[in-house]
Image (tube, grey):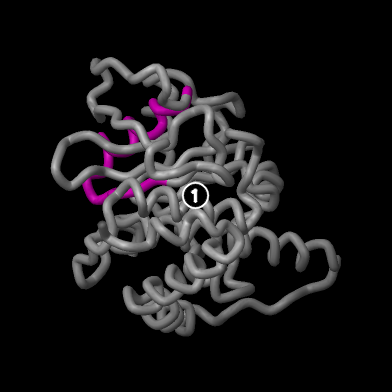
């Protein structure tokens, strides 16, 4: 399941309706609306279909104020010069794109529940629909809790991620990968919710039920189909545009 879940969707879905810069900017506002802000920290990036580079949110902008013009091009190649406005954790994105040709977009955030969850020894279990998707799909990286500033550490993160959909950085938030910006953003929201709900269940200090294995696969196919992800994105984008009116103009292809 791992390669299919985190890579190309069953229909080969690509983000073709909007320019990549606009998709990333809308994604930033969605992430902000759902609690992924940490000043200007955290990143979202996407491969560009017309070049070997990827676009990534600049260092000085947060999810809450990033605009299409705040996306800078970086090369995947480690020996390329990284633009000065790129975020310090660009090596994390370079390493994952180099290791995973199926990945078209990456989100790294310091979401609260995922950060707490990553500091425990808990594994995601299917308490919720979100937990069903991420069962056996989340790795951990505990070699350091520091910012990923160099290619060696970025490579270690990519190896820890393997072929899975997500990674918890110990004491440092989450990384989610997917074929498209839309899927990466929606799965990021869902991973944070899966962590939050499981932490709540654990706090009850009572036993709790989880989804049966045969239903986990049914949920993955139905709740996380291409059509479902597109609908979730549209709903989330509309909410982001209500909260951030300037984002409304980015939703047109022009």
Report the residue at 32% width, 62% height from top: 252
Q: Nearer the viewer, residue 250 or 218?
A: 250
Which residue is label 1 attached to?
28
Report the residue at 25% width, 30% height from top: 76
Report the residue at 58% width, 71% height from top: 126
| Residue 138, visible in the rendered structure | yes
Report the residue at 45% width, 46% height from top: 107
- Is the C terminus in the top left, top right, bottom left or bottom right quadrant? bottom left
User: In the picture, residue 85 is in which quadrant?
Assistant: top left
Stretch in magenta = 88-106
Q: Nearer the viewer, residue 45 or 71?
A: 71
Rendered position, 209 above or below 200: below
Assess whether residue 43 is covered by the magenta stretch: no
Residue 12 in picture, x, y percent from top left: 19, 66
Rendered position, 155 above or below 101: above
| Residue 190, visible in the rendered structure | no
Residue 238 in picture, x, y percent from top left: 50, 69
Q: Is residue 5 left or right of residue 129?
A: left
Assess whether residue 101 is covered by the magenta stretch: yes
- Callout 1: helix, strand or loop? helix
User: In the picture, residue 219 is in which quadrant?
Assistant: bottom left
Rendered position, 126 above or below 156: below
Q: Nearer the viewer, residue 166 or 126?
A: 166
Q: Is residue 52 left or right of residue 89?
A: left
Residue 181 in picture, x, y percent from top left: 36, 55
- Is the N terminus in the top left, top right, bottom left or bottom right quadrant? bottom left
Residue 37 in picture, x, y percent from top left: 63, 44
């Amino acid at each position: 399941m791992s390669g299919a879940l985190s890579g190309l969707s069953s229909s080969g879905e690509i983000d073709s309706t909007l320019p990549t810069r606009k998709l990333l900017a809308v994604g930033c506002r969605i992430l902000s609306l759902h609690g992924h802000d940490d000043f200007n920290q955290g990143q979202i990036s996407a491969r560009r279909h017309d070049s070997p580079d990827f676009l990534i949110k600049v260092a000085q902008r947060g999810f809450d104020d990033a605009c299409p013009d705040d996306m800078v091009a970086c090369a995947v190649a480690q020996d390329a010069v990284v633009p000065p406005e790129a975020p310090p954790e660009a090596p994390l994105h370079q390493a994952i794109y180099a290791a995973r040709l199926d990945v078209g977009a990456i989100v790294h955030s310091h979401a609260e529940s995922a950060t707490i969850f990553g500091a425990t020894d808990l594994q995601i279990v299917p308490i919720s629909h979100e937990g069903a998707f991420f069962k056996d799909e989340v790795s951990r990286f505990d070699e350091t809790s520091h910012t990923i500033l160099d290619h060696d550490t970025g490579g270690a993160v990519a190896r820890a991620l393997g072929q899975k959909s997500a990674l918890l950085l110990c004491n440092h938030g989450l990384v989610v990968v997917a074929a498209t910006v839309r899927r990466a953003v929606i799965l990021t929201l869902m991973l944070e919710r899966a962590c939050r709900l499981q932490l709540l269940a654990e706090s009850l200090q009572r036993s709790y039920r989880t989804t049966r294995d045969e239903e986990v696969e049914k949920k993955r196919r139905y709740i996380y189909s291409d059509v479902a992800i597109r609908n979730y994105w549209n709903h989330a984008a509309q909410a982001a545009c209500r909260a951030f009116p300037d984002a409304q103009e980015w939703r047109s292809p022009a």
